[in-house]
Amino acid sequence: MHNWKNETIASFSYHLKNIIESGISLVDSIQMLTLQQVIPENKGNKLIQMIQQGESFSNALQEIRFPVIFCSFIQAAELHGNLIFALQQCHRYYLTRAKWVKKMKKVMFYPVFILSFLCLGLVFLSIVVLPSFSALYESFSYELPATTRFVFTLSHVFPYLIVLMITLLLLCIWGRRRPTFQVVFVRVPFIAAYYRYRYTQYLSLQLGSFMVAGVPMLSTITLLEQITPWPTLSNYLTNTKQKLIDGDTLSNIVQEDSEALLPIFSQTVVLGEETGKLGEMLGRLAITTEEWLAEKIEKWMTYLEPILTLFIGLVMAIVVISLFLPMFGLIQAVQ
C-alpha cells in the first residue's frame, strides 16, 4: 500500500489541473507527470493503463491507493463535469493539510521529545528508585503523605499504563480512517468540532458544484450519499434524501437536523433558496469554512505546546515532591 504524502498529492493536483487547462488529454497529462516523476512511475503507468482500458479516473485512483477524500472529489467531478475545479480544490485541501502537518510536527517535537524521556525516566523510577524509597520509609514505620502513597501505588502499574497508552495511540493512528473508528472519533468533543468544520466545507463545496452544474437536488444528495468518505455524513445525507422524497424542502431539513454541520450551513441554505443563488453561496461558504478551520487549527496548535510543557512540569514536580516530602517529616521527627 502506497503512503501518499500530502505534498505529492497537492503537486499532482496542481500540475494536472494546469496541463489539462492547456488542452492536453487526461492520459497524456498523467504520462507527462509520470515522466517528470511527480508521481512514482509504476503508479503512473498503472493509472494510464486502467484509464485506457475504460476505467474511470476515480476508480483508477482508488486502485493505486489514492486517499478516499481525493477520490471522492474526482468522482463528484466526473458526475458534474468539472474536473479542473475538483483538482483545484484537491490542491488547496492537501496543500493546507501539508502545512498543518508540518506545523504540528514542529510544535509537538520538543514536548513529545521531553515527554518520551519523562516516560522512560518514570519507568526507571518505578522499577529501580521508588521500590528503594518505599523500603526505606517502611523501615522507619513512618506514615507517608497521601501524594507519596499515591505515587508508590502508581509505580507498580506505571509500566503497564505506558504500554497501554502506546497501544491506544497506535490503534488510533491505524483506525482514524476506518469507518468504525470514525463513528467513535466524532463523539470526542475536540475531534467532533474538527469534523463539523470538515463536513460543512466538504458538503458545501460538493453540493454547490452540483447545483451550479444544474444537477437536480435529489440526484445530488443521492450521489453525495454514495461517494462521501465519512460514515456520519453519509448517514446524514441518507436521512436528508428520505425527507426530500417525502416532500420536505432542504431548508427545513437542515434547520431540523443540524448537529452534524455548522449552524451557518442551514442559514446559507435558507438564504440561498430565498435568493435563488444557493449554488454560488454554498461555494463561497466552502471557502470561508476552510479558512475558519485553518484559523481554528492554528489557534489549537499555539495552545498545544504550553499545555504539554505544563503537564510535563506538573508530573515532574509531583514525583519529586512526593519522594522527598517524607524526608522532611523524618528529619523533624528525629530532631
Image (cartoon, rainbow, N blue to C red):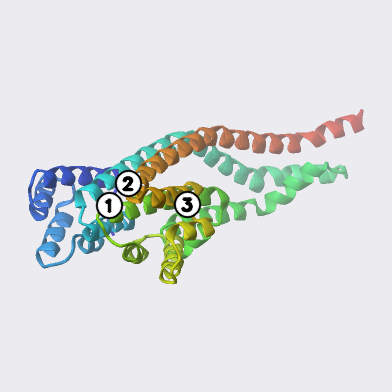
Q: CA distance from mark 3 to mark 2?
A: 15 Å
Q: Which residue is more in the foreground, 229 or 184? A: 229
Q: Earlier in the sequence, mark 1 or mark 2?
A: 1
- Element carrying mark 2: helix
Residue type at the position of mark 2:
Glu
Q: Which mark is residue 154?
A: none
Asked whether residue 285 appears in the rendered view, the answer is yes
The number of callouts visible is 3
- Element carrying mark 1: helix
Q: Residues within 10 Å of mark 1 (few under 14, many from 20)?
A: some
Image point 43% across, 48% down: which residue? 271
Q: Which residue is mark 2?
A: 280
Relative to 237, say whether 307 is above or below.
above
Instruction: Provide residue 69's location: percent of width, then percent of height.
Output: 33, 55
Q: Which residue is mark 3?
A: 266
Instruction: Provide residue 306's location: percent of width, then percent of height.
Output: 56, 32
Q: Earlier in the sequence, mark 3 or mark 1?
A: 1
Residue type at the position of mark 1:
Val
Residue type at the position of mark 3:
Ser
Query: Would you say the residues marked 1 and 2 are in contact, meaning their CB atoms lie under 8 Å apart?
Result: yes
Q: Residues within 10 Å of mark 2 (few under 14, many from 20)?
A: some
Asked whether residue 113 appears in the rendered view, the answer is no
Query: Would you say the residues marked 3 and 1 are in contact, meaning their CB atoms lie under 8 Å apart?
Result: no
Q: Which mark is residue 212?
A: 1
Relative to 325, say whether 64 is above or below.
below
Tell me which corner region of the image, top left, top right, bottom left or bottom right, holds residue 235: bottom left
Image point 27% across, 44% down: which residue? 91
Q: Residue placed farthest to the top in the image?
A: 335
Tell me which corner region of the image, top left, top right, bottom left or bottom right, holds residue 104: top left
Instruction: Provide residue 160's location: percent of width, then percent of height.
Output: 61, 56
Q: CA distance from mark 3 to mark 1?
A: 18 Å
